[in-house]
Amino acid sequence: MELLYHKYPNVFSQDASSYIKDFKASSNLVENAQPIFSKPYSVPYSMMPELDKILDAWVAQGKIKPVAVSGWASPCLLIPKQPEGLRLVIDFEKTINKKCKRQIFPPPNPQTIFASLASAKVFCVVDDVSR
């Protein structure tokens, strides 16, 4: 991934607040969507400092903004990240995913996928979030 960042610097942001320059996410909610407030998952007390650290970093980077009151709430949890550390994961399945319009894309045919990999010699796992 580091090679891509150096080869295409005009595409990727140089700070950790945004991975792709000028990208703004948006949601496509169904008409008259009512907010869903889901209770939080319990986080082990020993992980609370790490959770606070991640949330504080996201606020500092402008990824999230603190709010006093909201009708929306999605539970989050910390999962182990390879080779070390923890990753904050937000479970939108119970909340916003239920209120988003579905974009339907036909799944690719397995034969097409395997054919595209036939000439490949190297396979890897890419985790851009851990950079």
Image (tube, helix red, strand yellow):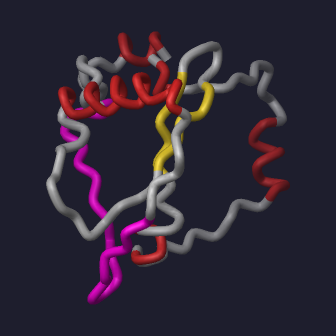
In the displayed structure image, the side of residue 105 where residue 37 appears, left or right: left
Q: Vertically, is 56 above or below 117? A: above
Q: Which one is nearer the viewer's eye here, 107 or 73?
A: 73
Position of the C terminus by quadrant: top left
Q: Is residue 33 magenta?
A: yes
Farthest front residue? 45
In the displayed structure image, the side of residue 50 where residue 78 appears, left or right: right
Name which quarter of the figure residue 5 lies in: top left
Q: Which one is nearer the viewer's eye here, 112 or 75?
A: 75
> Residue visible at 30% across and 25% down?
12
Q: Vertically, is 71 above or below 115? A: below
In the displayed structure image, the side of residue 48 where residue 127 appears, left or right: right
Q: Vertically, is 66 above or below 117? A: below
- Secondary structure mainly formed by the magenta segment: loop
Count of picture labels: 0
Stretch in magenta: 19-38
> Residue visible at 76% across and 49% down?
113
x%, y% of residue 76?
47, 47
x%, y% of residue 70?
22, 64
In the displayed structure image, the side of residue 23 where residue 93 appears, left or right: right
Name which quarter of the figure residue 101 lies in: bottom left
x%, y% of residue 111?
84, 55
Q: Is residue 83 magenta?
A: no
> Residue visible at 62% across and 27% down?
80
